[in-house]
Image (tube, rainbow, N blue to C red):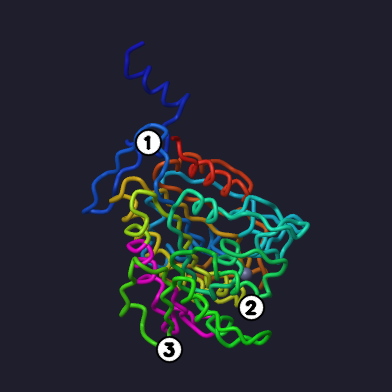
């Protein structure tokens, strides 16, 4: 048997690692290819959650922007099972608890188990490793997905209680809506913006200045509230996600020095387009989020020591692309105004990305990240 045939057979039998140096090659024109050592663990983890971003949302967004998506740059791809402890159809709270804390729980739970006992999030584990941490969302910052990283509460609706948990959370950088839950509270007179300032934060908001006018100082933690309640859709003029994500990566990278950082950036409103059964809303939110994905990949390629994970908490709307569609003019059908129970994809790039292949429970996202956080010293 000649050598080439033997090599081909070996590749068929054993496969090629999707995060090996050979298969992870930069597609950005200016970025150098990343070089991975065997069993290397990432210094930084960027977790990108497209809320309600199922395969059809991705497909529709990709076709709508010239049959192209930054997601095509990933080679390590898996599928996760999204069901909650008490329902095949999860909500964002149970699913976020699953991937942030590693437990299946009931719908509405914010980082508590099915007995309402608090569970520890990956962000807190990152802090144990002296990593810098950040959260960016296009919902309020107290909404289910970001909340599950810094708060624990028996109900996602307790927005004012969740906001209190930001005090003392140690989160270095946060950007999202929901200012009224901090400084115009119904249940008490507390001004959490002042309390955050006393807790070492620089805090600003939409009514004071545009986030793009700010340069956060590394001497302070940074918080910026983008709206009084829910931020508006990108089609209505919301424009902070991309600059806030860029700022988060630069700030956390500089602040963390050699310790690394963990950041979760959520494209919250892909879900809201699904609930509204509006394809244009889904697609416009995806297209903006796709740019964040590209930015994260560019950062990771340049850095060479950053793991990027992109996934969703669930699919929303039971969306299908219908016969009669063209790429320029998609005909969509939604089967529900709620979430659906389908598996959702997971995309991973960088050191440890290999672990995210296959089909697994949403809680495994947490387990895999936690295993990669543990230092080898
Ligand atoms: Zn939803």
Residue 340: image location, x then y, percent: 66, 62
Q: Residue furthest left?
A: 30
For residue 106, side relative to residue 36 (left or right): right
Q: Is residue 322 visible?
A: no
Nearer to us in this view, 161 or 316: 161
Are dots 3 and 1 in contact, CB under 8 Å? no
Q: Is residue 232 magenta?
A: yes
For disc 2, the neighbor class at 10 Å (few under 14, some 14 to 19, many from 20) is many
For the N terminus, the image quarter is: top left
Q: Which residue is mark 1?
A: 20
Residue 207 is marked as 3
- Segment colored magenta: 223-251
C-alpha distance separating marks 2 and 1: 46 Å
Res. 70 image quadrant: bottom left
C-alpha distance separating marks 2 and 3: 20 Å
Label tally: 3
């Amino acid at each position: 048997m000649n050598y080439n045939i033997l090599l081909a057979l070996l590749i068929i039998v054993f496969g090629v690692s999707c995060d090996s140096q050979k298969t992870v090659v930069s597609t950005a024109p200016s970025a150098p290819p990343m070089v991975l050592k065997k069993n290397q663990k990432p210094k930084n983890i960027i977790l990108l959650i497209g809320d309600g971003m199922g395969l059809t949302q991705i497909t529709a967004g990709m076709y709508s922007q010239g049959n192209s998506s930054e997601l095509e740059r990933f080679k390590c791809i898996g599928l996760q099972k999204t069901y909650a402890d008490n329902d095949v159809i999860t909500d964002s709270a149970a699913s976020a608890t699953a991937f942030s804390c590693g437990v299946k729980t009931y719908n509405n739970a914010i980082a508590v188990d099915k007995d309402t006992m608090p569970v520890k999030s990956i962000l807190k584990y990152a802090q144990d490793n002296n990593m810098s941490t950040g959260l960016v969302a296009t919902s309020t910052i107290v909404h289910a997905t970001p909340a599950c990283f810094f708060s624990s509460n028996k109900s996602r609706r307790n927005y004012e209680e969740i906001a209190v948990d930001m005090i003392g959370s140690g989160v270095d950088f946060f950007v999202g809506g929901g200012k009224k839950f901090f400084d115009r509270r119904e249940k008490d007179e507390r001004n959490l913006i002042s309390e955050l300032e006393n807790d070492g934060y620089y805090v600003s908001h939409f009514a004071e200045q545009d986030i793009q006018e700010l340069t956060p100082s590394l001497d302070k933690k940074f918080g910026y509230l983008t709206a009084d309640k829910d931020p508006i859709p990108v089609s209505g003029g919301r424009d902070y996600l991309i600059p806030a994500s860029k700022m988060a990566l630069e700030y956390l990278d500089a602040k963390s020095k050699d310790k690394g950082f963990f950041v979760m950036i959520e494209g919250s409103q892909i879900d809201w387009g699904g609930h509204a059964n509006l394809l244009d809303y889904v697609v416009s939110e995806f297209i903006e989020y796709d740019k964040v994905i590209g930015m994260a990949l560019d950062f990771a390629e340049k850095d060479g020591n950053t793991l990027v994970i992109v996934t969703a908490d669930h699919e929303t709307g039971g969306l299908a692309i219908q016969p009669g569609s063209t790429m320029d003019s998609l005909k969509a059908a939604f089967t529900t105004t709620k979430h659906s129970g389908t598996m959702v994809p997971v995309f991973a790039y960088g050191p440890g990305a290999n672990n995210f292949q296959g089909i697994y429970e949403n809680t495994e996202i947490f387990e895999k990240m936690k295993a990669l956080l543990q230092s080898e010293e």
